[in-house]
Image (cartoon, rainbow, N blue to C red):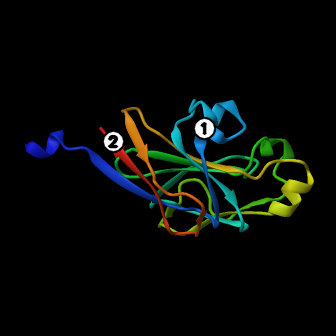
Amino acid sequence: MFGLFKSKKQMLVSPVDGDIVKLEDVPDEVFSAKLVGDGIAIMPHSNTFVAPVAGVITKIFSTNHAFSIRISNGLEVMVHIGLDTVELNGEGFKALVKEGDKVSVGKPIISADLAFIESKGKPTITPIVVNHKKEVIVSSDKVGNIQEGEELMQVTIS
């Protein structure tokens, strides 16, 4: 009975090697104003983006520039590779899984050609956001460089 009042915590790992950027510093108001959810961003250094949590792939965008994973507690995590990358119409991206697939932490989800994306004038900064119907608190004291699979942020669902 007392467990009903405890918050639920979920740890997310980094989906890619790179440098951490505060979500508020992402040069796109949709992300910096947290209109799609709270989280953190990474300036990626590698081309393979993996699952930051275990769950089910609920969305692979048709242009393969973003994906969402739902975990068993209903939390949904979106990884959006680059800004305005939808305009590339899928060029430079390759999905490695499909919607409905169950994935474990670290499972490769999307391969992206970062050099190609940058050559087209698109920033590669990658927001990782959490959205949920209930209130979520995202916390991270991480700064600087992070490696794929390292703890990135803690999410508390109240």
Label 1 Cα crowd, 10 Å radius (few <14 / some 14-19 / many 20+): some
Q: Position of residue 62 (x, y in %)?
A: 73, 46
Q: Position of residue 120 (x, y in %)?
A: 91, 51
Residue carrying label 1: 24
User: In which quarter of the view is residue 158 placed?
Assistant: top left
Residue carrying label 2: 157
Q: Residue at x 73, y 67 (%)?
A: 47
Farthest right residue?
Answer: 119
**Relative depth, front residue between 135 and 142:** 142
Residue type highlighted by circle 1:
Glu
Is residue 124 shown left or right of residue 6? Answer: right
User: In which quarter of the view is residue 92 placed?
Assistant: bottom right
| Number of numbered markers | 2
Q: Residue at x 34, y 45 (%)?
A: 156
Label 2 Cα crowd, 10 Å radius (few <14 / some 14-19 / many 20+): some
Above or below, 135 relative to 20? above
